[in-house]
Amino acid sequence: MQQKRSAFLYILLWAVQLLVAALFLLSGVMKLGYPITKLAALYPWTGQVSAAFVRLMGVVDLAGGLGLLLPSLLRIKPSLTVWAAIGIVILMASAIVFHVSRGEQSVTGFNVVVALLAAVVAWGRYRKYPVTPRAQCI
């Protein structure tokens, strides 16, 4: 029974990690590649800040998504996955402050959920199921 529970949690952790990574990769591609006018129709704040800020957030989102996946998948410095997840939690906390300061409290629920999911990844990869680094060849 314990082994089934353990396997379920292991798979669930990977699923959450993949979900959050996919979300950030998609968001990064959109913020980097879509015209600002198209983005502003989806996310009004993107039309009310500088284009450079939106593009910078695209780079940050891509880095977060890649950081959640690549170190664990390649097993090269997998502890970076934990740091990427912590960075996403901080980014989502900053997004909540940003939206509240603009009177957009109604959109912060999404940020809270993403922050919680990223915190689960950080905890899971640090405490419960850390990925072991690949053995180095000499």
Image (cartoon, helix red, strand yellow):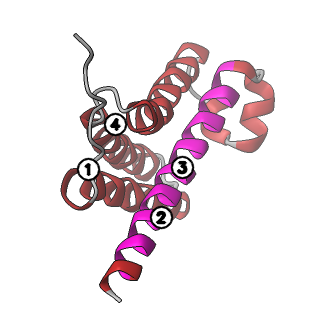
Q: Amino acid at mark 1?
A: Pro
Q: Secondary structure at mark 3?
A: helix
* Coordinates of residue 126 in the picture (x, y in percent): 21, 51
* Coordinates of residue 71 in the picture (x, y in percent): 38, 31
Q: Residue at x 35, y 74 (%)?
A: 6
Q: Residue at x 67, y 42 (%)?
A: 43
Q: Secondary structure at mark 1?
A: loop
What's the mark number on residue 18?
A: 3
Pointer 3 and pointer 4: residues touching (CB < 8 Å)?
no
Residue named by callout 1: 130
What's the mark number on residue 84?
A: 4
Q: Report the span colored magenta.
A: 5-32
Q: Amino acid at mark 4?
A: Ala
State which quarter of the image contains the C terminus: top left
Residue named by callout 2: 11
Q: Nearer the viewer, residue 49 or 14?
A: 14
